[in-house]
Amino acid sequence: MPAKILLYYVFTPLADPEAVRLWQRDLCELLGLRGRIIISEHGINGTLGGDMAALKTYVRKTKQYEPFKGIDFKWSTGTGLDDDGLSLDFPRLSVKVRDEIVSFGAPGELAVDENGVIGGGTHLKPGELHKLVAERGDDVVFFDGRNDFEAEIGKFKNAIVPNTETTHDFIAELESGRYDDLKNKPVVTYCTGGIRCEVLSSLMTSRGFTEVYQLDGGIVRYGETFGNTGLWEGSLYVFDGRETMDFGSDAATIGRCASCGAASSRMVNCADDSCRRRTVLCENCGDAAVCRAHAGVAA
């Protein structure tokens, strides 16, 4: 069977996150799945890899639980399976309960009900996003909801990329005043699969942004719809063994090697031990470079 990867989340009230954790862990172990699942009182967020048959069973079993019946599962192709039939894209299975299923550091600000996040931005499907841009033109602002290094290899054209080394940095960025000029403009938030923008858009709305949208299904769903023919350019960074994914063989390469400046989408860890950042480094330059943001110069 082919190796596949599932990306999914749902915001919904969970009365007993620990019971859900035990059930999800046992289900994944029974099916031989690897990956990461985070559960909180606000819902579930997961990325799993394995063979297609096992993942289909996982989807069916998970949707039988009433709060999870509406989960939108996104499928992509994995790297492969090892001799035991386990995903090569994840070293292990991790299922944890945390205060937040995406870590903005503001669990007390988030409110959810059975319909999802309360007070979030208006969802836009990929086609609806194009309609908004056609109608409003250059007034539309794309706001990247990911860690800033991810945008080095792929982003929406002319997008604003906040100074966010981790998701925890977004609140300080929003409250810095740097983006106050956007508060009366149509702002479209986007991220990998859509989850971070669920929270980000609600944080922006509560801080005075008056017209906030979020790309439904994230970059993944947009890429499935338009490939490289739309407003996205470059490669998508993913947090598994694949590192990056493209939406076709004609993807543009917008990343630049931190050492020599060559076009590349290859990302490695910064060589400085005190720096936890990922940085672009082409194959010709090997695996050691100090990221520009940390050192200010190439290695």
Image (tube, rainbow, N blue to C red):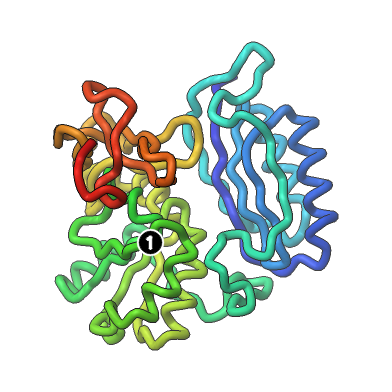
Residue 165 location (% of width, % of height): 40, 57
Q: Residue at x 68, y 65 (%)?
A: 99
Identify whether 198 is placed above or below 295: below
Quadrant (top left, top right, bottom left, bottom right) of the C terminus:
top left
Three-letter amino acid code at disc 1? Thr
- Left/right of residue 38 with respect to residue 174 in the rendered view: right
Looking at this view, name the residue that lies furthest to the top.
Answer: 83
Quadrant (top left, top right, bottom left, bottom right) of the N terminus:
top right
Residue 45 location (% of width, % of height): 61, 53
- Left/right of residue 281 with respect to residue 238 in the rendered view: left
Identify whether 63 is placed above or below 110: above
Identify whether 248 is placed above or below 41: above
Q: Residue at x 42, y 69 (%)?
A: 170
Question: Dot 1, crowdedness within 10 Å: few (<14), some or many (≥20)?
Answer: some
Give residue 52's quadrant in the image.
top right
Residue 10 location (% of width, % of height): 62, 59
Q: Secondary structure at mark 1?
A: loop
Instruction: Please indicate, yes or no, whether residue 192 appears anywhere in the rendered image.
Output: yes
Q: Residue at x 27, y 48 (%)?
A: 295
Residue 145 or residue 186, whichever sits in front: 145
Instruction: Please indicate, yes or no, whether residue 245 appears anywhere in the rendered image.
Output: no
How many labels sit on residues? Answer: 1
Q: Residue at x 18, y 76 (%)?
A: 139
Identify whether 192 is placed above or below 228: below
Circle 1 residue = 164
Residue 37 location (% of width, % of height): 66, 47
- Left/right of residue 287 with respect to residue 100 in the rendered view: left
